[in-house]
Each structure stands twice: as structure tokens, then as C-alpha cells.
Amino acid sequence: MDPNNPVVKLCAQGMECEGRGRFNDASGLFMKAWHQRADDFERCIAAHYVARHQKNPSRALLWNQRSLDHANAVRDARVREFYPSLYLNIGKVHADLRNHEDAKRFYELAAKDLNSLTEQRYGGIVRDAVRKALLRVA
């Protein structure tokens, strides 16, 4: 991702706020990113982060699905490594909503796309989370 992209910058700032326990500030930055988005790539990123701060699982599902829809609308490889995380998050919300079959389906989709992740820290975190999610629904 382009670190100079304004939406990416806002989401990175939001993640820094989360890391410091400033969740309201983080949520505000993610919403600001959503309001500044210009294309489906930026919409995908912003919606992914807005979803993290939804207290209601139905709202979280809405935002995660919105992120996935925008990822699907991007016609190049920029979102390729987002899919495992998007599927994982949608699976988690379905699990929270006790939609166990849907949760399992999305966790399996995440597992199928793990090869798109790099070997960096982020890839390892997502791989581990998918493995644990599959164990929970097995």
C-alpha cells in the first residue's frame, strides 16, 4: 500500500491510536478515512477499519461486507492480500451472531486465500487467526 495515500495515512494513524488505547480517536480517524475515500480501493480499506469499531455485530457485518464488496470491485491486485483478513472478519461476525455455517464458510474462504499473504508479520498474524478460527468451528 502507498503510505502517502491519504486514506492509508488516516487508517495508520487510527491504528496508532488503537495501540495507545485511544479508541474513540481511532474510530474518528477511520470514519474520516471513509469520508475521504475516492475509489473502491480506498473504500475497501476505510470500511475494513470502520468495521473494527462497530459495537453491534450486525453493523460490523454491514461494514465488513461493504469492505468486501469494494474489494471485489477493484480490478487489479492491490486488494489481493486483503481477502484472507476480510473473510476472517466476516466469519468472526457470523460466529458472534451464531451463524455457525456462515462463519465456517468464510473461515474456509480465508484459508483458501492464505497464499496471497506475504511472510511478514501481518501475514503471520492472519494465518494464525485463520488456523484458530478453523479449529473453533471444526
Image (cartoon, rainbow, N blue to C red):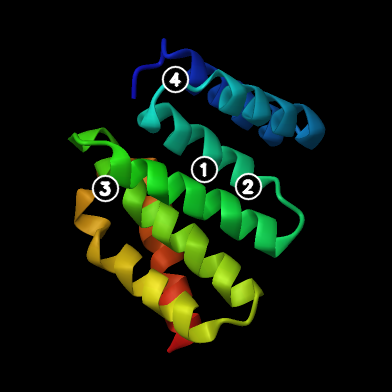
For discs 4 and 3, the disc positioned in front in the rendered view: 4
Q: Is residue 107 shown above or below 45? A: below
Marks 4 and 1, the one that precedes in the sequence: 4
Question: Amino acid under label 2?
Answer: Arg
Residue for badge 4? 38
Q: CA distance from mark 2 to mark 4?
A: 21 Å
Taking depth in this image into account, of 114 and 100 the one nearest to the observer is 100
Image quadrant assignment for residue 130:
bottom left
Question: Amino acid under label 4?
Answer: Ala
- The numbered mark at residue 52 is 2
- The numbered mark at residue 117 is 3
Residue at (65, 73) in percent of width and height = 96
Marks 2 and 4, the one that precedes in the sequence: 4
Marks 3 and 1, the one that precedes in the sequence: 1
- The numbered mark at residue 48 is 1
Question: Amino acid under label 3?
Answer: Leu
Q: CA distance from mark 1 to mark 2?
A: 7 Å
Q: Are marks 1 and 2 in contact (CB under 8 Å)?
A: yes
**Tag 4's secondary structure?**
loop
